[in-house]
Amino acid sequence: MSTPLVSVADARRPLHAGVDVGGTTIKIGIVDDLGRTLGATKIPTADETGVPDAVRRIAAALRSLADERRIDSGDVVSVGLGTPGTMDIPAGLILEPPNLPGWRHFPIRDALAEACERPVTYANDAGAAAYGEFWVGAGREHRSICLFTLGTGVGGGVIVDDVSIDGAHSHGAEFGHVVIDTTAEARRCSCGKPGHLEAYASATALVSIVRERLAAGEPSSLAGIAADSLTALDVAKGAEAGDALALRLIDDLAVRLGLGVATVTHVIDPEAVILGGAMNFGGAAHPLGQRFLARVTAEFRRLTFPVQAARTALLFAALGGDAGYIGAAGLARLNHRNQAS
């Protein structure tokens, strides 16, 4: 998805920059005070070169983006930064993100603030995406939301009345690590613990389960794809073409996710639950996406209280891959406003 751009002349000041760090790509955008994008770019994460080099490249890319869009650098008053994995948000430290082995125990917030010469607001990447959806995306009509990000792993974010719920130890909203299976046969999560939602409802889990079923001899058109080349997109395409195994396993994933959604909803009781991330099976505009959301919703309603079942909206995210930088910028905007008041 590419968010439509607002012209520099029409943008409402002040402006804010957002940075969304991923395992392979860093997305950078500049948004106005209404959450509209003036310009966006991306650079390789290049984990092997380390965090200091990434900070320098982020600052350089942000300056280049401002120059390209003819944005006065003085109009950009703050920067929001979202990173994956474990972190100490109050201290501005990235700790041990599993998908960035070269980024360890580094004061990334303050380093970026120095490089950009702007105050930086630090957030979990999924928390930033949640704020983006809350501010100007699928959750904009709601006062409280939970966002599940479905991709390589399962991330989460909680926004209640304009506040991101990060937790006492910067580990709030780790929805992928909600325990949904306590049996001895529970699947192992990427974190090493058994029975976590991520071990059943991520793209990695889906591919792993399909490989196991194919190895066990279950018939499927997916058997023609080399096991080490199989992706979640291949599984989705197989399901779209009517492959019985692919459809059944996506349905199973939806049921597991519905359990996770019900568990989180019983704790947070949000107005809306939003499903984001790359693994949305085409979203609301696609029959497979509609089927997926319907099954998640059915399992959620089966397990939750009647009032929540009737009143909690389950929606697909609206901002796609842009939610992270938009939300990071939004959190920076919020911090800027609070400090000015």
Image (spheres, rainbow, N blue to C red):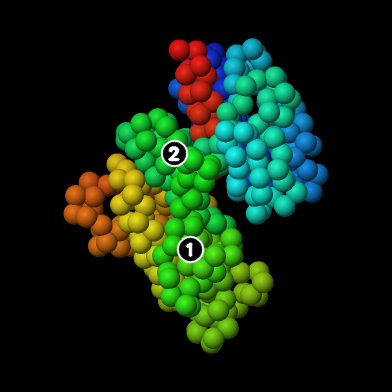
Does the residue at mark 2 contact the one at mark 1 (Cβ under 8 Å)? no
**Image quadrant assignment for residue 240:** bottom left
Question: Quarter of the image containing the C terminus?
Answer: top left
Residue 268 found in image quarter: top left
| Left or right: where 290 falls relative to 195 | left
Instruction: Name the image quarter holding residue 27.
Output: top right
Quick one: SS at disc 2?
A: loop
Residue under label 1: 196
Furthest residue toward left: 306
- For the point 46% across and 53% down, the residue is 175
Task: Please name the residue shown 52% across and 19% down the image.
Answer: 336
- The tag earlier along the polypeptide, 2 or 1, is 2
Residue pictured at 51% horizontal, 65% vertical: 199
Residue visible at 60% across and 14% down in the picture: 75
Q: Which residue is mark 2?
A: 165
Residue 120 image position (x, y, % from top left): 61, 26
**Does residue 244 sit above or below 88 in this rendering?**
below
Which residue is nearer to you in this view: 53 or 24? 53
Q: Is residue 292 visible?
A: no
Give percent across and percent down for residue 321: 54, 43
- Taking 306 as reference, is 37 left or right? right
Q: Is residue 214 left or right of residue 264?
A: right
Callout 2 amino acid: Ile
| Residue 257 disc label | none
